[in-house]
Amino acid sequence: MSQPEAVRRRTRPFALLGSELALVFRRRRTWAMLAALALVPVLIAIAVRLTTDRDSGGPAFLGDITNNGLFVAFTALTVSIPLFLPLVVGVVSGDTVAGEASHGTIRYLLVAPTGRLRFILVKYAGAVAFCLAATLLIVLVGAAVGALLFPIGPVTLLSGTQVDGWSYAGRAVLLALYVTLSMLGLSAIGLFASSLTTVPVGAMAATVVLAGVSQVLDQLPQLDWLHPFLFSHLWLGFGDLLRDPVSFDSFGANALLQLGYVAVFGALAYGRFATKDVLS
Amino acid sequence: MTSGTVPDEQAEHPDPPLAVRTEALVKVFRKQRAVDGIDLAVPRGSVFGFLGPNGSGKTTTIRMLLGLSSATSGSIELLGRPVPGALREVLPRVGALVEGPAAYPYLSGRANLQRFDAADPASDPRTRRDRVAAALDRVGLTHAADKKAHAYSLGMKQRLGLANALLAPRDLLVLDEPTNGLDPQGTREVRNLIRSLADDGTTVFVSSHLLAEIEQVCTHAAVMRSGRLVAQGSLDDLRATGGRTLTIRTPDVGQAGTVLVRLGLEPRRDVGADTLVADLPADVLPEVVTAELVRADVRVRGVAVGGGTLEDLFVALTGEGFDVAA
């Protein structure tokens, strides 16, 4: 083509990434799921506030909230990890490839042309961005609601030392990052499941079910040899972040575990998709 | 739409004469040979009609041309470059409507086009808004550009798909059944669009199972049947291979029939009691037939030589009826 030859030759590898983020976060479903997640800290805080006087015997950390509103974010994230987060992460990651296939839009992205590797990477990046947004949202809403309903003050850490609110806020963000990291493996599994089908619901369900299976297996003592390899094994292992000084050991171990899952299932997803006939 | 094509483009870039070329292209699904060794040759600058009944392998071929599925065997060249090897380089110059339009239902038509445009790493984000607006305008979708795509009718979706193919100046357009779902008015608009694109120098490769819809705009055509190419060439060449028919109106049908049989024709009765129709081989001249009829005292009310239309050829090559090719 004669006119914009020089301009059109220059390539912009990140243009699609921006478009993908806009696609994920402009979607009403994304907002609905984020709103549901934001309700978790709100409901916890209100419930605890209403029952404070009658000192009901809930889990220990629920009682901590009454002493310090900063614990709301921490508690909300902990409560969300086993079910709510895997559920929404399963929906988003299971939709990645299968959603595009079911709409047929995958054809037009590929002939645009988007390389198949770039397509997979961008879709995965979109899912990861959603995980990050979800965990940060829980932390932010938790902090806001906690400050509104409860006293805020210095926090006593697991190691016995006290830190002020700002230092604790920094740890809360670290916690959000830890939980995001925890979801990377599941997201990669969702991506792979999504590359196997053109029915997004199937991939979503498979991903969520696997998250449940992994957690159940993690509870069976007979399978303790398997536990270190389960992607959910370190989901709740973020206690290190509440010690002084912060220990990054569990962060590192979890990163290794999750990256292993990302490598394996990312490669499987790409291997499956790279040679696939796009017939949808 | 700012078409970047200048009239002497071909002189500046000595491009290969064929926009699409396949050799012995085969696609096997399980045991079925969906595409069975076709050799396509689409000249640059042509409007190439790719015809065939439903299920004859047209879309499968198009998917292979665009790298959406891989060929079982055979080779493909698009704009002189090998496919799938040079897809990344050649696809920005190709606009496509494959297997019907597709859109994100929760995005507006405009947002859909912006997304597809962003997927082309060679597209310029600074001109994106203008190019999207121009493409929407060109297909007459401007008034509905900001409606969500799930509210679009089939015809509007089809227009959106066409707009997507026109987001950038293209050297080749591959349009798979572009008139599907459009009303007669929309069909005519698509024809005009194809004509104006061709005038800009764009090669248009357009598939259809309805010959009549695209016959008027094509310069070349190929006909598929059951995965094989049964005819290919310029429209004039194809017409020449199509048989002519002789139609005779006479009250003396029986007598006329005898004369025609004597001349080596195979007359059959057509609509109306006084009409005979026969295929007319090239070596039988109509004036000879008329003279023979008159000599045999057949009262001739009318003689007409017809046929040679693409429609006749199409039907002859692909068969009639509603059966989907197996």
Image (spheres, rainbow, N blue to C red):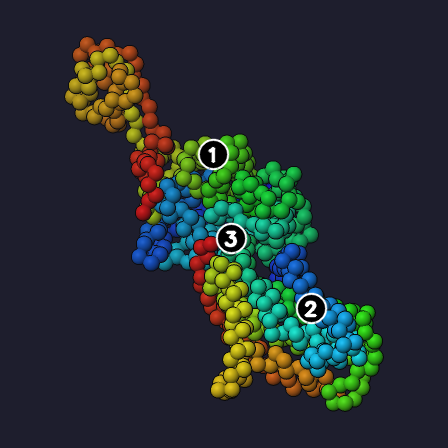
| Chain ID of residue with mark 1 | B
Residue A59: percent from left, percent from top? 68, 80
Residue A117: percent from left, percent from top? 53, 65
Few, some or many residues within 10 Å of mark 3 (<14, 14–19, 20+)? many
**Of tags 2 and 3, which is closer to the observer?**
2
Q: Secondary structure at mark 2?
A: helix
Residue B272: percent from left, percent from top? 29, 18
Identify which residue, A227 or A9, lies in the foreground: A227
**Is there one chain holding both mark 2 and mark 3?**
yes
Q: Residue drawn at (59%, 63%), measured in percent from left and top? A: A92
Find disc 1 in the rendering and name its residue. Answer: B217
| Chain ID of residue with mark 2 | A
* For residue B257, above or below residue A265: above
The alpha-carbon separation of the residues under discs 1 and 3 comes to 29 Å
The alpha-carbon separation of the residues under discs 1 and 2 comes to 62 Å
- Find the residue positioned furthest to the bottom: A160
Q: Can the viewer see residue B143?
A: yes
| Chain ID of residue with mark 3 | A
* For residue B82, above or below residue B280: below
Q: Are marks 1 and 2 in contact (CB under 8 Å)?
A: no
Few, some or many residues within 10 Å of mark 1 (<14, 14–19, 20+)? some
Identify which residue, A148 or B132, lies in the foreground: A148
Find disc 3 in the rendering and name its residue. Answer: A104
Residue type, mark 2 in image:
Val
Q: Secondary structure at mark 1?
A: loop
Find disc 2 in the rendering and name its residue. Answer: A40
**Is there one chain holding both mark 1 and mark 2?**
no
Q: Can the viewer see residue A19?
A: no
Residue type, mark 3 in image:
Gly
